[in-house]
Amino acid sequence: MSRFVDRVTIHVAAGNGGNGCASVHREKFKPLGGPDGGNGGRGGDVVLVVDPSVHTLLDFHFRPHARATNGRQGQGSNRDGAQGEDLELRVPDGTVVLSPDGEVLADLVGAGTRLVAAQGGRGGLGNAALASKARRAPGFALLGEEGETRDLVLELKSVADVGLVGFPSAGKSSLIAVLSAARPKIADYPFTTLVPNLGVVTAGESVFTMADVPGLIPGASEGKGLGLDFLRHIERCAVLVHVVDCATYEPGRDPLSDIDALEAELARYTPSLGGELAERPRLVVLNKTDVPDAKDLAELVRPELEARGLPVFEVSTVTRTGLRELSFALAKAVEEHRAAQPILEPTRIVLRPVAVDDAGFTVEPDPENEGGFVVRGSRPERWIRQTQFSNDEAVGYLADRLARLGVEEALAKAGAVPGCPVTIGDVTFDWEPSTPAGIAVLMTGRGTDARLETNNRVGAAERKAARKARRTPGEWPAFDDEDDDFEE
């Protein structure tokens, strides 16, 4: 038996970017041919795409986790890593994307509408792309960024021109069955219809869609019965039709009280999209008039309903009485609604240039570390994620990037002193002002940086000079093993 699911929570994860490659070209007679490490590939995105052939969120109910592929790592000989493939998730027309907190992120209406639910991580640059006048053969590469991971709530709101509103067993399923090719389940007990049913109705040259949604009861706006599961599917309807059971034998029920109860629930319900339901045109269908008592009741209440300004139609789904007039009246109301809609204009691309005085980052006092600071900004945080901290040369390159961006100057203005803790992204380090940006970097061994050298061990040149001095007659400087220094 097929199931209808109109609300799910999914967990999407984009692909990670591939790491860059640190490689040096080597061949015969060219032991150091220059850096040739390729860039890492971009991670794949997770994209939601509206597909008219999909009518339910059932697939996401059983498979809520979706992950795109990762980008491949770069290789030597200037070979870039392969990009990860985007993962496209097909969703029905009328799907609303929300955050776990209930914030509406997107309203997917129209075939082919796309939304990037999770963005793939950027690939890291290889050392060939990092080469410069200061670093002719970088001994490091940038790491790939992690893909975005998000939890999203998908809600399906039926996209129909006409919505049938009524108490359980009012005859809504029978009405849509005789007006269209839809074949909903029909039975003589309440809440037979548990899921919305869509049907296509043709009236002359007009074609429109009709939604038969689960029955409404008093208190539905507060979640009673099927509650919001029902009301969600009438938000997009252009015309609302009250289907009233004139043959009911329940005490305290009559067409006027039923309509008043339904209108009270609609007034209490404030949709998240589409404006107020009170502005939608209404029609009243007095159903089951093939029953003698129901026919008399319909003729009794008809004048009062018409006095309220509501068009009234007496129909019978058994004898098909009044269905032709009803279908043409609905077609006219739908055409008037379509004509009143504004002409859709193509989406305009808006460019928002960065302000001249916008540094792209902020420096704030750290509330958790006394005397510390937190640097916030997309670029510094991204650079932190791309840095391999086990490589001193990569750390020195990060320091140069931050200095060129103005982070060190901003920290000094904020009152930072050498040794104070500074947090960028997920990394906290003790701040030490480095060489000002723009000064040429001292060339050292691959994977090292002279500014990060912390040992005081005597180098080979100093040891050679000391050995030569010992062989020379006269006074010569002595070497102290304990403090690694020379003494007179």
Image (spheres, helix red, strand yellow):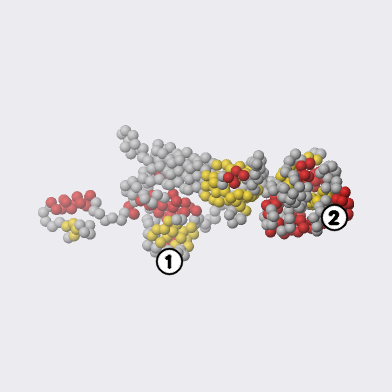
Q: How many residues crowd mark 1 within 10 Å: few (<14), some (14–19), many (20+)?
A: few
First along the sequence among labels 1 and 2: 2
Which residue is situated farthest in the left direction here? 473
Q: Amino acid at mark 1?
A: Glu
Residue 407 appears at what percent x and percent y? 44, 57
The residue closer to the viewer here, 73 or 216, is 216
Using residue 118 as the reference point, say whether residue 469 is left or right of it. left
Residue 224 appears at what percent x and percent y? 69, 57
Q: Is residue 51 above or below residue 430?
A: above
Which residue is situated farthest in the top direction here? 28
Disc number lying in front (1 or 2): 2
Q: Amino acid at mark 2?
A: Leu
Q: Is residue 289 above or below residue 454?
A: above
Q: Is residue 265 above or below residue 39?
A: below
The residue closer to the viewer here, 249 or 412, is 249
The residue closer to the viewer here, 449 or 305, is 305
- In the image, what residue occupies the spot 56% across and 44% down? 63
Using residue 112 as the reference point, say whether residue 425 is left or right of it. left
Mark 2 element type: helix
Using residue 183 as the reference point, say whether residue 446 is left or right of it. left
Which image quarter: residue 38?
Answer: top left
Residue 68 appears at what percent x and percent y? 52, 43
Quadrant showing the C terminus:
bottom left
Q: How many residues crowd mark 2 within 10 Å: few (<14), some (14–19), many (20+)?
A: some
Residue annotated with mark 1: 370
Residue annotated with mark 2: 305
- In the image, what residue occupies the spot 55% across and 51% down? 151
Q: CA distance from mark 1 to mark 2?
A: 72 Å
Residue 30 appears at what percent x and percent y? 32, 35
Numbered tag placed on residue 298 in the rendering: none
Mark 1 element type: loop
